[in-house]
Image (cartoon, rainbow, N blue to C red):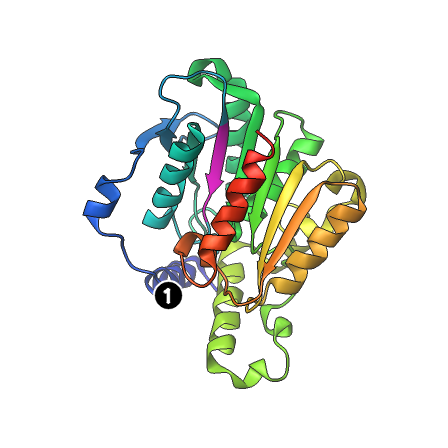
Amino acid sequence: MNREDKLALAERCRKAGAFGFIAPEILNALPVQPVNHMIPAGNRPSDINIFDGTKGKAGQPLFINLHGGGFIKGRADRDTVYCSELAEQFQTMVWDVDYVLAPEYPYPAAVNETYDVARYAYEHTEEYGYDPDRIFLLGHSAGSNLACAALIRNYREPAFRVRGMILDYIPVDQRINPFSKLNPDEYNDPKRVARALMEYNYLELYMEPEQCIEDLASPAAASDEILASFPDTLIVTAGYDTLLKEGEDFACRLAKLGVPVTWKRFVNSRHSFTINRFDEWKDALSLHHRFLKGLI
């Protein structure tokens, strides 16, 4: 597939499967409004929406939100709602990162940007006024993969510290063909097959096939030594998600390595349910809040 074909496929994927926009009146009524910043975190400026719920109080935690979208779709209004409510409830600062997208910026560009943003955040705590020892990474789907990848790179090139991490329905092993995740019954379900095709297309746009074995692409490929360095981690899985098994295998592996892990399967939920607010989303966001409250 040449570059023009990839760009055309990405455009089709970006238009398909959208959850729609949130009404402007709802966004305008959010308790904490975002302020857009372009921060010089790496080779190019990073687009960050900052939600400041501190009310002038210094030394609060910093939450860095990494949205989903298969590495090819950008920040959505539902991330804005999620970040605003977190900023208000915890009276803290939230950075919502609109990282670069494939195929325009293929792997590992988004990994490197996530690492650079976390490093920049750690190095500029006095400027923004949050606590450098209470920085959290909040990742959803592709964003959870990027959170892990940034920590893996940070193990090799130490630049920041993370107090805790949330991983929602994580695509942790890109070495597995999406179609092989379907059981025999699911092959007869057009929706399941369409979902597998979508995941396959995302990977085609994100990286070259031979790159899937790298641990920055597939965190499950990282060594035990690296993964044992991870912070307290919450892993959320969905019962009707093809990523269920790899996410739960990853949770078990981290726990066996001594990482403090909280894991919950929401058995009646589908992929992306937390941020997009369907199925058991209320219970899942309550779990997010309890996990964060226990660490800050």
Image quarter (top left, top right, bottom left or bottom right) of the C terminus:
top right
Q: Does the magenta stretch include residue 65?
A: yes
Which residue extends farthest top? 126
Image spot of residue 228 (x, y percent):
76, 39
| Magenta stretch bounds | 62-67
Q: Residues within 10 Å of mark 1 (few under 14, many from 20)?
A: few
Q: Position of residue 28 (x, y in %)?
A: 22, 40
Image-quadrant location for residue 18:
bottom left
Horizontal side, residue 26 vs residue 262: left or right: left
- What is the chief secondary structure element of the magenta stretch? strand
Residue at the disc numbered 1: 17
Percent across and percent down for residue 119 are 55, 26
**Residue 30 lies within the magenta run:** no
**Can residue 125 be seen from the camera position used here?**
yes
In percent of the image, x 46 and y 56: which residue is there? 281
- Residue plotted at (47% across, 68% down): 198
